[in-house]
Structures are given as C-alpha cells and as structure tokens.
Image (cartoon, grey):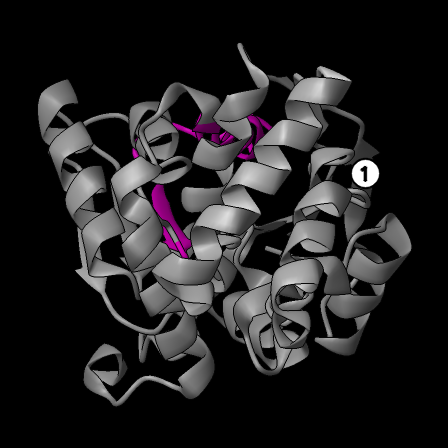
Amino acid sequence: MATEEPASEHALRASRTYGAAADHYRRAALSFWDRFGAATVSRLRLAPGGTVLDLCCGAGASALPAARAVGPEGRVLGIDIAAPLLELARARAADEGLANVELRHGDATRTGLPGGGFDAVVCVFGVFFAPDMAAFVREMWRLTGPGGVLAVTTWGPGLFEPANSLFWRCVGEEEPALYKAFNPWDEITTPAALAGLFSRAGVPDPAVAAAAGQHRLDHPDQFWDVVLGSGYRATVDALGPERRDPVRESLLADLRSREITSLRTDVVFGTAVRPG
C-alpha cells in the first residue's frame, strides 16, 4: 500500500520536526492541539457507526474525539509521518479504552486507500506541509464518500503573537539564515485563501469560517514549551546547542519584561460535503 512508499522530502522534514516535538506535546502549554482538534470534529456532526480518516493525525487531537463521536461500532483511521506522535496517540487511545482507532505510520498525502471509503476526512494543521496543497486536498476529496464531509483546519494570521515576532527576532539576531526558514503555516491563513485552496482542488461549495482565539500561559517562560512542542522545533534544533541557549535566554527575557502570557491563536475552519 502507498503508505509504505518512500516519503517525500516535505514529509520527512515534518517527521523530523514533529517527531522531536513529541517530547513536549503533552505539556500544559500545548493544550491548544487538543482544543482545536476537538473543535474541528464538533463541526462535523459525526453519527454513531461512522468511518473517519484523520490525515496528519499527530498525537490524536482530532482522531480521539472522532472515535468517541462514532462510538464502538464506528472506525477511525489516523495516518501520520511522525512515529513518536503516533505512539502518544496509541497510548492515549488505550488509556480511554478506544478500540475503534487504528493509527498508521505513513505519508498522509500518499495513502493508497480506495476512493470514497470514509464518511469524514479530516486534516487539522497539516495541509500546509504538503508540497502541493491543492493536490493533497484533491486526494482528501477522493477519499470522502458520497454524503461525507471533508474538513481542513488551518491557523489564522498572527499565530502566537506577540511572542512569535519576538522569537523570530531572537533567531535572526543569532543566525540570520534561519529567520523564518521553516514556517509553512503562514502560507494559508485566511478564509479566502482556504476557500481558494478548495476551489483549486476541485472541491465545490466549501463552508469556510474564521474564529479568533487567545491561548493563555501560566507564565511567560511556558512559551518555550510551545517552541519545543510545535513547528518552531525545526528552527531550534537547526540552531544547535551553542546558539540555542542565547536565543532562549534572549526570548524569555523579552517575554518576561513584557509580561506576555496571552498568545493569538486564530484558526480557519473549512468543510465541504460531497453530494450523496
């Protein structure tokens, strides 16, 4: 099956980044993963006994709520390229006694699955890692069955501001070549952009909605947990130990002096229903 094919370079980079970030994923400062995964699933009105495909499923932020929604008679298949995140998801599913979840390691853009096999296909904060986002959405649409729903969730503009700008400033001062060298989530941050992506993929009549949000930290220093448990991890690991510490110290000093404990977490939800 296609999940056994060699992964693309984009997928391998995501695997390295989020495989490393897995060691921070369950920290309190990163509760936004579960919050927005659940929010995406809640918009789908899944029925008991349904089948769900969760692409770029990560640590189960959307796969586990989907499994609860479809119940024991339903089935959820999650696919992700980062094996350590899948291990987290499996442990969480086992803790909850969710036996209706299968979590599979592979490139989500190349599943090799037969078309039309799922009542819902979900991708939360993953579409922007694909080298061809329109082709990825087109593939998701192929996998969505008649009467089924496709759901794609992306970050909105200004993710993690004001801490985001401070992070990149500190990185640029230490190593200019790494300044915003890996931030693909900034490529599609508005309802118009997400609607346009659906259109380019040949998905008709999407419903797209922006939702403003704020994420609270108990202390400014917790933003470093966010850094290490998110896509920023690629940049931090590229810095290496000698340059990482000065970036951390400079960033945390700025965050403390400004008393920053609230981060912008706007999202854009996009859904489309395939005609029955």
* Residue 202 position (above or below residue 128): below
Q: Nearer the viewer, residue 32 or 218?
A: 218
Query: Residue 260: in sight, yes or no?
Result: no
* Residue 10 position (above or below residue 273): below
Query: Residue 160: in sight, yes or no?
Result: yes
Location of residue 114 in the rendering, given as x and y in whole percent from the top left corner: 33, 75
Q: Residue furthest top?
A: 218
Q: Residue at x 26, y 84 (%)?
A: 2
Q: In the drawing, does residue 71 fall left or right of residue 47?
A: left
Q: Residue at x 15, y 46 (%)?
A: 87
Q: Residue at x 74, y 24 (%)?
A: 213
Q: Quadrant of the C terminus?
A: bottom right
- Residue 138, magenta (yes or no): no
Location of residue 172 in the rendering, given as x and y in whole percent from the top left corner: 70, 62
Location of residue 121 in the rendering, given as x and y in whole percent from the top left corner: 47, 53
* Residue 154 position (above or below residue 61): below
Q: Residue at x 26, y 71 (%)?
A: 106
Residue interval drawn in magenta? 30-56
Please state which amino acid type lies under the numbered disc 1: Ala
Q: In the drawing, does residue 266 fall left or right of residue 34?
A: right
Residue of label 1: 209
